[in-house]
Image: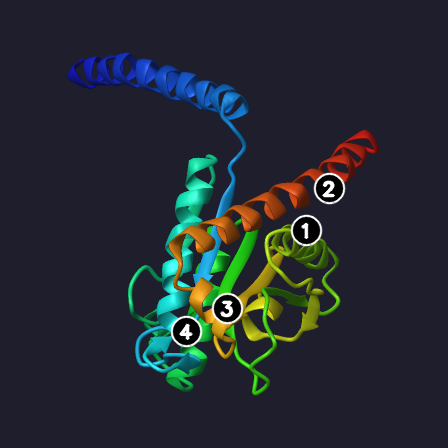
Amino acid sequence: MIGLYIVVIRRRVLVPILLCLTWLAVFGLVLAGLLPERRVIVIDPGHGGIDGGTSSGNLLEKDVNLRMGHILRQVLEAHEYQVVMTRTDDSDVSHFVPEGASRYRRDLKGRVRLVGRVRPISLISIHVNWHKDSWRRGAIVYYQNGEAESRLLAEAIQRELNAIQPVERQIRAADFYVLRNTDAPAVLVEIGFISNPEDRKLMQDEAYLTKQAEAIRAGIEAFLRQLEPSAESSKGRR
């Protein structure tokens, strides 16, 4: 008799719980359809920690990259993008891959691993250029050779950057580890030549860095608009 009561009580408790879970599942599916599309972008400020990158005097690439990364994050978040940064301070990312290989290789692998976990709509890696010819200047966007969508993203961002800089540069195909091992459309933006006096001055000017960040944001949005027709046509073929 006691066993029968226990069974009845369990049923009375379990049925409302199951109904509640079912309702939550249905509500979750409905809500997912109403929420804005998840727009996550990873910003990768190059170098960091003991790896200063290139330099000119006391100006280190790693510091410029990080400053630009934070400015770009603020610009993107103001336009309702979710942003993940591979680093937010003067450190590298080698701790994501604690064993094996050199610190430099573990740092690169750590960046790729973070991007893989986040699964963003794009990756923007920030760097600074250098050349022995100090007259060379201007931001240049690199993409992984053979990656069609990354090339489109690079073209869109380069077009916007060219509109605000005194020289017109062309995108360049490359074979960089982070770009090569990232599934999402990915570009590496060299925001200027630290070896050029004019560029070096600009990369220390927050107002100009903000203009560059807005240009990168505009390029990302132009790229995403390019993808919309193909997404709609693929739906129609199903």
Task: Name the amino acid type tagged 1.
Answer: Ala
Separation of disc 1 and disc 3 at Cα? 21 Å
- Which badge, 2 or 4, is on the more N-terminal residue? 4
Separation of disc 3 and disc 2 at Cα? 31 Å
Task: Name the amino acid type tagged 4.
Answer: Glu
- Which residue carries the number 2 mark? 226
- Which badge, 2 or 1, is on the more N-terminal residue? 1
In the rendered structure, the answer to whether residue 132 lies left or right of residue 52 reads right
Under circle 4, the secondary element is: helix
Q: Quadrant of residue 110?
A: bottom left
Q: Residue 66 in the image: x percent, y percent?
A: 37, 63
- Which badge, 3 or 2, is on the more N-terminal residue? 3
- Which residue carries the number 4 mark? 61
Separation of disc 4 and disc 3 at Cα? 13 Å
- Which badge, 4 or 3, is on the more N-terminal residue? 4
- Which residue carries the number 3 mark? 199
Under circle 2, the secondary element is: helix
Under circle 1, the secondary element is: helix
Q: Residues within 10 Å of mark 3 (few under 14, many from 20)?
A: many
- Which residue carries the number 1 mark? 156
Question: From the viewer's perspective, is the residue at label 1 or at label 3 nearer?
Answer: 3
Task: Name the amino acid type tagged 2.
Answer: Gln
Task: Name the amino acid type tagged 3.
Answer: Asp
